[in-house]
């Protein structure tokens, strides 16, 4: 009887885990979120190395789910706010990638709770507001409520009498209730360390370009870098270099802090929480 031979098992070729993670992270940060299975396949990552690549992606500040690898939703929302200043809550899931409406709303609430955004109303629509938006504070709202009650009472009296109001009186009341228009915050007023705390990922690291975007983008680069470097010199923050060459897009690289010997400092951690 002929002996049946079994073909030898084909082994998965070894890959460079760090290089694969760098390539995947670069693609995800470009698009916001991508399918995990496709990303692993494109980099030749087999089952044996999938866990190591997943850990490397998490260390790079990305969220790795069962089917999607994404930039953290809170970071995506902060970036969107940094660009648009106002983002409607209705349909906000379309403004970011890789999250259900429920997930995105939860991330929005967390961003507000951490002080990274405010909830506002424009016309009848509920929106998220960037912190740089000139919006009314609680005292302003209280004055407006008082004015609205007074004007409503006055208007009813005028209607009952078949009369009207003197324009100067109405204008004076509105001027008294509304504060002067505020100037945009100066670079020194930016809450850089607050943004670092709000945008940090599960590893405790914060992506420096995300902080820059949340606080104004290209116009805020110098102010953010100066504040981070001052805090690092005082021992409150630790800066870490980019782990892989070529991972960053052009804008991300321009938002990072130049380091020694041509390195790029792209991550920051609060040292006070490492004790």
Image (tube, rainbow, N blue to C red):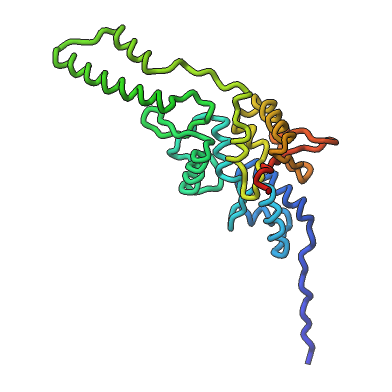
Residue at position x 76%, y 65% from top? 12
Whether 2 is drawn above or below 148: the answer is below
Residue at position x 62%, y 32% from top? 192
Nearest the viewer among 90 and 112 is 112
Residue 38 percent coordinates (x, y): 65, 54
Residue 212 percent coordinates (x, y): 64, 32
Residue 185 percent coordinates (x, y): 57, 22
Residue furthest right as drawn = 261
133 left or right of 206? left
Location of the N terminus (image quadrant): bottom right
131 left or right of 5? left
Whether 20 is drawn above or below 75: the answer is below
Q: Quadrant of residue 91?
A: top left
106 left or right of 37? left
Nearest the viewer among 244 and 238 is 238
71 left or right of 174? right
Residue furthest left as drawn = 161
């Amino acid at each position: 009887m002929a002996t049946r031979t079994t073909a030898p098992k084909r082994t998965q070729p070894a890959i460079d885990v760090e290089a694969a993670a760098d390539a995947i992270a670069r693609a995800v940060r470009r698009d916001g979120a991508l399918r995990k299975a496709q990303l692993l396949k494109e980099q030749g990552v087999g089952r044996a190395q999938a866990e190591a690549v997943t850990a490397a992606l998490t260390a790079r500040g990305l969220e790795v789910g069962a089917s999607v690898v994404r930039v953290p939703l809170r970071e995506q929302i902060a970036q969107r706010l940094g660009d648009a200043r106002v983002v409607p809550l209705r349909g906000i899931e379309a403004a970011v990638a890789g999250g259900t409406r429920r997930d995105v709303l939860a991330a929005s609430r967390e961003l507000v709770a951490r002080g990274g955004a405010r909830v506002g109303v424009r016309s009848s629509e509920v929106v998220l507001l960037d912190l740089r938006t000139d919006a009314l504070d609680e005292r302003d709202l209280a004055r407006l409520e008082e004015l609205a009650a007074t004007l409503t009472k006055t208007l009813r009296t005028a209607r009952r009498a078949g009369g009207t109001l003197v324009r100067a009186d109405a204008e004076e009341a509105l001027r008294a209730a509304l504060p002067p228009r505020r100037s945009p915050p100066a670079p020194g007023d930016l809450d850089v360390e607050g943004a670092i705390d709000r945008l940090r990922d599960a590893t405790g690291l914060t992506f420096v370009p995300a902080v820059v975007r949340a606080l104004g983008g290209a116009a805020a680069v110098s102010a953010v870098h100066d504040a981070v470097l001052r805090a690092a010199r005082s021992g409150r923050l630790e800066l870490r270099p980019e782990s892989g060459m070529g991972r960053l897009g052009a804008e991300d690289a321009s938002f990072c802090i130049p380091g020694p010997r041509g390195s790029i400092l792209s991550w920051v951690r609060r040292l006070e929480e490492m004790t």
